[in-house]
Image: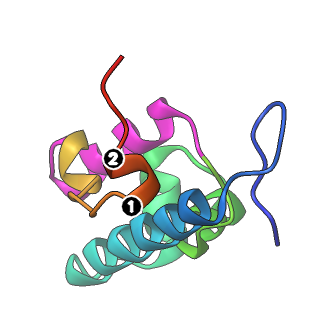
Amino acid sequence: MSVKRRSSALSIQEVQYLERLGAHIRALRQAHELGLDELADRAGLHRTHLWKIEKGQLNAGAISYVRLASQLGVAPGELFPAFPLPPDQAQREPS
């Protein structure tokens, strides 16, 4: 399934990032011994929404990540571990 943003499909690197992010969230959920339904309910999300986040199929909004972080007992930034930038992005000059 392709993840979409407003104007166009995400790049392969962006999709891979969402997949890694989702796997990280799933690992945190499992480490806290929470079921998918339980975490979704606590975070005020639909279980399908959380399932898609964990599978990397949904580019969720910031509030969804803040809610998940709160229920997982971590700072929102801890949901986004430092993944290496793809080579084409790492070489870009800051604007």
From what the image shows, is residue 8 above or below residue 48? above
The circle drawn on residue 91 is: 2
Q: Is residue 85 magenta?
A: no
Is 63 left or right of 61, judged from the image as shown? left
From what the image shows, is residue 94 above or below residue 17? above
Q: Is residue 71 magenta?
A: yes
Q: Residues within 10 Å of mark 1 (few under 14, many from 20)?
A: few
Is 88 left or right of 11, judged from the image as shown? left
**Quadrant of the snapshot with the C terminus:** top left
| Amino acid type, label 1 | Pro
Task: Residue at 59% x, 75% y: name it.
Answer: 55
Task: Residue at 70% x, 52% y: name it.
Answer: 10
The circle drawn on residue 87 is: 1
Q: Residue 62, how many percent across, how many down?
A: 46, 32
In which quarter of the view is residue 86 placed? Answer: bottom left
Can residue 86 be seen in the rendering of this structure?
no
Q: Residue 17, how many percent across, how many down?
A: 47, 63
**Quadrant of the snapshot with the N terminus:** bottom right
Question: Callout 1: helix, strand or loop?
Answer: helix
Q: Residue 59, how many percent across, how many down?
A: 62, 49
Q: Nearer the viewer, residue 71 or 87?
A: 87
Contact (Cβ within 8 Å) of mark 2 with mark 1: yes
Give the spatial CA distance, label 2 vs label 1. 6 Å
From what the image shows, is residue 28 above or below residue 50? below
| Amino acid type, label 2 | Gln
Task: Residue at 44% x, 47% y: name it.
Answer: 43
Q: Main secondary structure of the magenta part?
A: helix
In which quarter of the view is residue 67 placed? Answer: top left
In which quarter of the view is residue 52 placed? Answer: bottom right
Q: Residue 54, how many percent across, how many down?
A: 52, 70
Q: Which residues are magenta?
A: 60-75
Can residue 45 be seen in the rendering of this structure?
yes
